[in-house]
Image (spheres, rainbow, N blue to C red):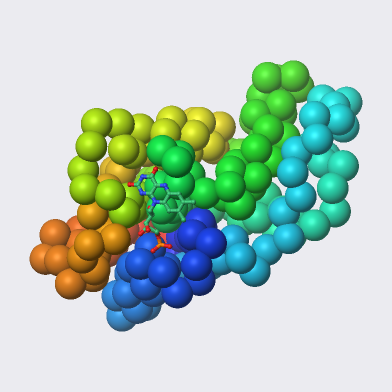
Amino acid sequence: MKQPVILKGSHRSNGQSSQYIDQLVEELKKNEIYPQVYDINRLTVKPCIDCSVCSNSYGKCVHDDDMESVYEALRATDVLIVASPVYFNGITSKLKQLVDRCQMIFICDFKHGRPYVDNTVSETKQGYVISMGGANAYTDQFTGNALSLGLVFRNLRMPLTEHFTYAGTDHSEVLSRNEAKDDIEKIVQNLKDFYQRVGEK
Ligand SMILES: Cc1cc2nc3c(=O)[nH]c(=O)nc-3n(C[C@H](O)[C@H](O)[C@H](O)COP(=O)(O)O)c2cc1C
């Protein structure tokens, strides 16, 4: 099935990044691509407590919460799209909590020597980050997002295909910008080409 996984990371379920994703999902559906969308505000994801359960037992986490479903989705998908505003030069705290829980995925490799995900070459996967910063553009505004999320993609054996960044979102709406419309179109086209190339999973 053509099913990208999308994580909405804003603490506002109807904020700009969320609206951007809704628009993207609408366009994808027109092309018969049906993403599985997670809104961080609707998930219970407890913080990683560094308890070593994942070090002692392959693929296990001490917590029993919505991360179970996210782990499975991350394991199964070949396309991951993560949207996050910039909060204090990094991803949002709720999304960071989810990212830290990907330590279990890292430990599968690092401690157990067996990847959590299909260890195929990265050409068969695609990853996207969409970041929005309220302030006008400044140096390193999106670097924190790229670094934190970059590690998640690495652990998923997924390339960070593109990082779309939008500054000044507190001054103008992203979806009214031609740049954003073009970017959404580009993601849709990329995914259409991608699924055609790698076939349906
Ligand atoms: C706690 C908090 C911290 C923020 N820190 C930054 C920041 O460091 N840099 C920046 O450009 N914008 C910052 N912003 C502004 C948000 O990035 C901006 O409002 C963004 O559009 C929010 O995304 P959303 O509309 O998807 O909720 C911050 C906003 C909040 C609430």
Q: x%, y% of residue 48?
A: 75, 38
- Above or below residue 31? Residue 96 is above
Image quadrant assignment for residue 116: top right
Q: Nearer the viewer, residue 54 or 93?
A: 93
Which residue: 35% across, 78% down?
26
Q: Is residue 54 above or below residue 13?
A: above
Q: Residue at x 64, y 47 (%)?
A: 98
Q: Residue 168, relative to residue 16: is it above or below?
A: above
**Splitting the image into 4 quarters, where does residue 70 fall?**
bottom right
Counting every numbered tag in the picture gives: 0
Instruction: Tell me the residue at 53%/37% (across/down).
Output: 152
Q: Position of residue 45 (x, y in %)?
A: 72, 54
Does residue 185 appear in this view?
A: no
Q: Is residue 3 left or right of residue 159?
A: right
- In the image, taking residue 28 as reference, residue 172 lies left or right, namely left
Residue 2 appears in the rendering? yes
Q: Residue furthest left?
A: 178
**As rendered, which of 33 and 16 lies closer to the eye?**
16
Give above or below for 107 relative to 4.
above
Residue 160 percent across, percent down from the top left: 37, 38
Of 114 and 87, the residue lying toward us: 87
